[in-house]
Image: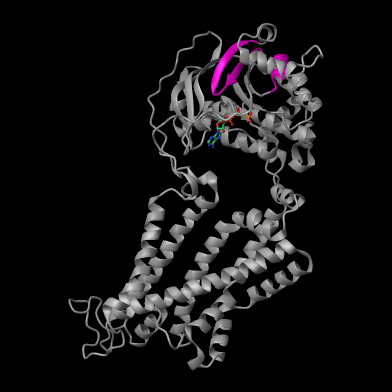
Amino acid sequence: MTTLAPVPAAEPAVRAGWRSMLPRWSPKLAVGLGLIGAIALFALLGPLLTGDPATIRDIGLTPPGGEHLLGTTQTGQDVLAQLAHATGGSLKLGLTVGVLATLLSALFGIVGTYVGGVVDESFSLFSNVMLVIPTLPLVIVISAFVPAEQRGAWTIALVLAITGWAASARVLRAQTLSVRTRDYVAAARVAGEKPWRVIAVEILPNLLPLLASQFVYTVISAILNEAGLSFLGLGASNSSTLGTMLYYAQNGFALQREAWWWFVPPGLLIALFGCGLALVNFSIDEIINPKLRDVPLRVKEPERAAAPVPRADEDAVLTVEGLSVEYRTERPVRAVRDVSLTLRRGEILGLAGESGCGKTTLAYAVSRLHRPPAEITGGTVTFHGERDEDVLALRPEELRAFRWSELSMVFQGAMNALNPVTTVHAQLDDVLTTHRPGMAKAERRARCAEVLGLVGVDPARLDSYPHELSGGMRQRVVIAMALLLNPQIMVMDEPTTALDVVVQRGILREILRLRDEIGFAVLLITHDLPLLLEVADRIAVMKDGEVVELADAERMRLRPEHPYTRQLLDSFPSLTGERGSFVRSGGSSA
Ligand SMILES: Nc1ncnc2c1ncn2[C@@H]1O[C@H](COP(=O)(O)OP(=O)(O)OP(=O)(O)O)[C@@H](O)[C@H]1O
């Protein structure tokens, strides 16, 4: 595949090596790391700066002030000093439980599932049993069973880890079952990779966001559960945690005595720490999934003043003028460069070119379906309906109406776009209820049956589910869906590539017939130039994001002008049955 040359842009600077693996610095990540860092620093340095938290003074329940920044407890102990020690205790306990429970859930949820058979069944049974045992009573029983003097922080951590892994293991098992059957995992197994490597390299990276969120959840619930246990007097006997602080505040009637400084700071710290972990967790998705790394989550489309281009040709239905699209990634790619095209009413305009030349990007941009990091950097797309409309300047509600009513789309692999759990009728009907709310039910059903008939599918199939149809039938249903509202333009990107040649030709013949009957225009994208020579009226050839030649199909077949068009034509078996030079010189059959 040809990849376009990166744009020689100065910004954004390319991050090299391992740094390119890191998520982009975002406000979320900064706030999350800031919160965790500040709390961890407070836990580390606080005890050194605040003195002994156990010192009893004769100034019980003093509100925050100069000498005691966070006031004192009932027995005159400094709340700030207690908070610093307790934060350290809670963080250690939360992180220990988080690590232990995550390891247990990974063992039972991932390894067991990957190994399969009896191991999976027994691991799954054990997880289920652990899941149905009510956690809090079990924790209370185990904690109560251990004598108070032996009930240290480690014992509590162990108890919480043992009771806290099962739910995560269930979730991980479900996800592992799904990932285990994916093609790339099967390919790794066939390639002879060892089981531990398949788990570590193929499966685990896909589960990391899940593991990370389970870890965050376990840490937070460990801190909260420990607070609950301490509250009941079953917490660690030899350590101070935020939970024990809350326990003593409760016992000292802090709430009734309006001593908010005793219980608000520990509660607030638990909430802030959870918030920080959750924010960092969002950024972990970016580390794992390269697709998310460069994509701004929210992109505000630039406001454009409508600049419709008057039709140059009486018959024009769509004019694309100087359109440029760029992928704003680490290495920006100018996928479409200054493309100008005119689509005439009722014509089939073919768009051909090798893989990666920008055909799909152009189709998405024309339909305004491009998503970040793709950005339209220049040009106009004008639809010539009752009046000329600048498609790139349409507001969201105008765009929604424009898309299916005036311009519909059939994209690569569209037959997989059908929802497997609803009938063909329900899916066709959805389009009508959205765009034609005034249409009666019987009328809608009749229209759905009519379009199915148009594309050569028996209307009796309306009540079938997609899995009950062949690939060719599903593809026809998708085309029927695109026809429902009688659009003036259909953008078809490789609409038949997944089908065998006979079905492919059948569907294309159907499209030609429908075009003759209904009169819509088609922008037909494919890298199959000979196919375009058969069905298209005019053909545009793209290379490296630019249209290098645009001509009538007949002229292009007989007298291709651009060397690249000639090369492309030569690379297919010729229409007269002889093989093209590319195939011959390659020495192998195409
Ligand atoms: N999300 C993306 N981020 C960065 N670059 C991208 C992205 N999507 C596509 N590209 C690049 O844009 C260029 C055009 O891709 P596009 O999918 O439009 O090609 P195409 O002609 O439709 O190819 P094919 O026929 O294989 O589908 C390619 O160089 C591709 O690597």
- Identify the residue at horizontal 72%, vertical 54% (top origin): 193
Magenta span = 528-552
Q: Which quadrant of the figure contains the C terminus?
A: top right
115 on left or right of 149: right
Seen from the viewer's position, the closer of residues 210 and 73 is: 210
Seen from the viewer's position, the closer of residues 433 and 240 is: 240
- Identify the residue at horizontal 46%, vertical 50% (top origin): 23
- Examine the image and state in which quarter residue 47 appears: bottom left
Residue 49 x %, y %:
27, 76
151 to 38, vertically: above or below: below
Q: Please tell me whether residue 254 belongs to the stretch shown in magenta.
A: no
Residue 386 x %, y %:
50, 17
Q: Which quadrant of the figure contains the N terminus?
A: top right
**Residue 572 seen in this snapshot:** yes
- Examine the image and state in which quarter residue 565 appears: top right
Q: Please tell me whether residue 535 belongs to the stretch shown in magenta.
A: yes
Residue 51 x %, y %:
27, 82
Residue 510 x %, y %:
74, 22
**Residue 437 seen in this snapshot:** no
- Identify the residue at horizontal 57%, vertical 36% (top origin): 434
Q: How many marks?
A: 0
141 to 100, vertically: above or below: below
Q: Quadrant for ligand 1?
A: top right
172 on left or right of 91: right
158 on left or right of 36: right
